[in-house]
Amino acid sequence: MSHPTLNIIRDEHGALSAMLRSLSMLLAEHRRHGSLPDFSVLRAMLFYVDEFPEQLHHTKESELLFPKLRARCPEIAPTLDKLDRDHARGEKSIRDLEHDLLAFEVLGEPRRAAFEQAVERYIDFYLSHMRIEEEQVLPLAMKHLSADDWKELDEAFLANRDPLTGHEPTDLYRPLFSKIVQNAPAPIGLGPALQ
């Protein structure tokens, strides 16, 4: 049986992966051409990561999904502990990345490499994190959680409305998503490739 929570988690992981790949591609393209990226687009992309995956998605995993699974599968506690630590440090990680972006924007080329390296570390970290959730956590959840567990989880996760998973952005977020989609490269956006 499929549960909306599982589909939402996978869709949100896919959206975050696409955003991170697009961010990396944008930086690589500008590096190849020796040009500076549009810093407002980079800020918008990082703001998305903070607002949606960091604040909505991770909170529900740590506060709802993981405790239920921890109660039914104590053997996965060390993995869940690690994932919870990842979530806890996620907010600091995105702030550090935003600081590195500001340094690149204000100080220019001497700070490009540090920002790009920080982005790549962040991407590696989150891709690994999501892989653990999808390969270890979700299969155990499917096997061990009860119908009541799924009902509660589905209700909570269905409230997530990440526009990168196909939901219409609210008026508040519409300018953010327009900026990203119009300026970032695929897989997230329609932005023009540099020539």
Image (cartoon, rainbow, N blue to C red):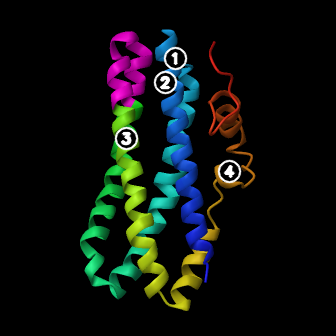
Name the amino acid type tagged 3: Tyr
The structure residue drawn at horizontal position 45% and vertical position 63%, both measured from the top left corner, is 59
Query: Which label belongs to residue 27?
Result: 2
| Image mark count | 4
Q: Disc 4 marks which residue? A: 163
Is 113 displayed left or right of 58 in the figure? left
- The span shown in magenta is 99-117
N-terminal label among 3 and 2: 2
N-terminal label among 2 and 4: 2
Q: Disc 3 marks which residue? A: 122
Marks 3 and 4: in contact by CB < 8 Å?
Answer: no
N-terminal label among 3 and 1: 1
Q: Nearer the viewer, mark 2 or mark 4?
A: 2
Name the amino acid type tagged 4: Pro
Q: Residues within 10 Å of mark 1 (few under 14, many from 20)?
A: some
Q: State the SS at label 1.
A: helix
Q: State the SS at label 2.
A: helix
* Real-space CA distance between mark 1 and mark 4, rounded to the nearest whole angstrom: 26 Å
Q: Quadrant of residue 7?
A: bottom right
